[in-house]
Image (spheres, coloured by chain):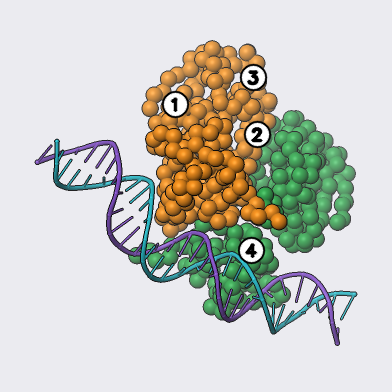
Chain colours: A green, B orange, C purple, D cyan
DNA sequence: CGTGGCCTTGAAGTAAATCAACACCAGTGG
DNA sequence: CCACTGGTGTTGATTTACTTCAAGGCCACG
């Protein structure tokens, strides 16, 4: 994990410009003056390779992460030892927001592919926030995004048959591009609340049906229309 | 629906004092001075009888509601016409927070029992917020509560067998009191992602087993220990 | 050339959906 | 007062989808 430091304005500005989603980029509408000031602060650019743990459930909350690029799973451990993936975070989203409220990390965050993220220490973000009220709206937008994501997860990925759920998940993964990196069958299961075997069977079935075509190692392309038909209303009269 | 107006400080202060959860009461730590000012604002005390719709999905966002007492379901309609209850809100929680960001209402909110709520118009809350930065933390706490509730919903109520889910739901409903008002079988189904028949069968089974005892019309008391056993780890070695 | 980690597949068992009937009650109108 | 009605809950029989248990395949790795 390679941590390089921002030591001044140009780097921070550059960093924010580079964010995947300009709409939600936290420092998007700061003035040059403000950027200059905050540019001095210890905001790290962190890189996580696929599979590495960004933080663990229960960790004392030190920092918020703004994901710039990549894919991260947030999972929670169940009382009975199992675990469930409650959300995915992509470029443009913020994770570990709960540390702003002084809570410990409520999930375990694991990179699903090579991921770059801004690590913003709690104190820094709180200070910046108290000095620039305009950030509140942005911060709220991040909270909101988490809620929307959670609701979507429930209505789309935890409702209906396994076939339908897998179809909807694939459609989500393939948003913005025909080709995408598929997840392990185990992760698919943990996301959809089904067993690894069922996940495997369903993916295999889609491949045989041709709606899912191999496009390299672990990469696939989908037949969006066909999957949408599976995911949507079964037979609308 | 009876709407009475707060026209001055004493009423608003009184209202906030009366909130079920002091921890999250929005105006909890305003100074007298601030309360005085905001007391003039059009914040309504709204009452909703069981079954009445507080707002519909897609409604243009006009106001945020702070629930003071009662129980509200937030449901979303699925592409295929069905619907799923994504969260319950009780005294102390805030709903329709998305209107602060200018969004339309993202759920349909329906009172499940007689419910009292503060209706705070969007503009008013935004103005109050811009004038009193201390409110930001509180507002964040509300957002956070929504996320936590959503995550809990997923891990507790959408994972495991129908039996286990119903048990966990009953435990949640009975939090803070042995006796509670049970929901319709249809609502139970919509919350847990199971059919009304399965919900009915499971509830009936719990009644026969004596872990759920009738305590008046639609009211029940639970055997917490027995239900916890069902809800928890099945056989921990 | 093994070894371990995923993925796949099969066969059997089971939980839940589905289809269907009926009980119960409150409200309504004869 | 009773018969009718619609809503909700219960229950049964059947079918279906998913889990579970188990084995074997494929491939990257040492």
Q: Residue at x 65, y 34 (%)?
A: B141
Q: Is residue B167 visible?
A: yes
Q: Residue at x 57, y 35 (%)?
A: B175
- Going from N to C along the chain, the mark reached first, 1 or 2, is 1
Query: Quarter holding the N terminus of chain B?
Result: top left
Chain letter belonging to callout 3: B
Rounded to the nearest whole Å, what is the CA distance between mark 4 and mark 2? 31 Å
- Going from N to C along the chain, the mark reached first, 2 or 3, is 3
B111 shown above or below B80: above
Q: Do the residues at discs 4 and 3 belong to one chain?
A: no
Which x, y percent locates residue A182? 66, 68
Comparing B67 with B163, the one in front is B163
Chain letter belonging to callout 4: A
Which x, y percent locates residue A148? 58, 47
Q: Quadrant of residue B2?
A: top left
Residue under label 1? B46
Comparing B47 with A179, the one in front is B47
Label placed on residue B141: 2
Chain letter belonging to callout 1: B
> Dot 4: few (<14), some (14–19), or many (≥20) neighbours within 10 Å?
many
Q: Nearer the viewer, mark 4 or mark 3?
A: 4
Secondary structure at badge 3 equals: loop
Label placed on residue B30: 3
> Dot 2: few (<14), some (14–19), or many (≥20) neighbours within 10 Å?
many
Chain letter belonging to callout 2: B
Residue under label 4? A188
Q: Is residue A36 visible?
A: no
Comparing A30 with A90, the one in front is A90
Secondary structure at badge 4 equals: helix
Q: Do the residues at discs 1 and 2 belong to one chain?
A: yes
Rounded to the nearest whole Å, what is the CA distance between mark 1 and mark 2? 23 Å
């Amino acid at each position: 994990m390679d941590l390089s430091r921002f030591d001044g304005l140009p780097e921070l500005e550059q960093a924010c410009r580079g964010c995947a989603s300009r709409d939600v980029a936290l420092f998007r509408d700061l003035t040059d003056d403000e950027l200059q000031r905050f540019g001095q602060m210890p905001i790290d650019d962190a890189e996580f390779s696929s599979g590495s743990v960004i933080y663990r459930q229960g960790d004392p909350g030190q920092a918020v992460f703004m994901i710039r690029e990549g894919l991260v799973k947030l999972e929670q451990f169940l009382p009975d030892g199992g675990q469930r993936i409650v959300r995915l975070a992509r470029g443009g989203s913020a994770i570990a927001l709960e540390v702003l409220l002084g809570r410990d990390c409520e999930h375990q965050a694991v990179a699903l592919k090579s991921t770059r993220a801004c690590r913003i220490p709690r104190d820094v973000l709180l200070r910046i926030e108290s000095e620039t009220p305009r950030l509140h709206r942005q911060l709220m937008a991040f909270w909101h995004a988490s809620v929307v994501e959670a609701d979507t997860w429930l209505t789309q990925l935890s409702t209906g048959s396994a076939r339908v759920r897998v179809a909807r998940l694939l459609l989500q993964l393939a948003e913005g591009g025909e080709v995408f990196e598929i997840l392990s069958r185990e992760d698919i299961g943990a996301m959809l609340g089904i067993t690894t075997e069922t996940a495997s069977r369903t993916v295999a079935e889609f491949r045989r049906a041709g709606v899912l075509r191999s496009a390299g190692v672990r990469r696939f392309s989908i037949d969006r229309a066909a999957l949408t038909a599976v995911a949507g209303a079964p037979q609308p009269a």
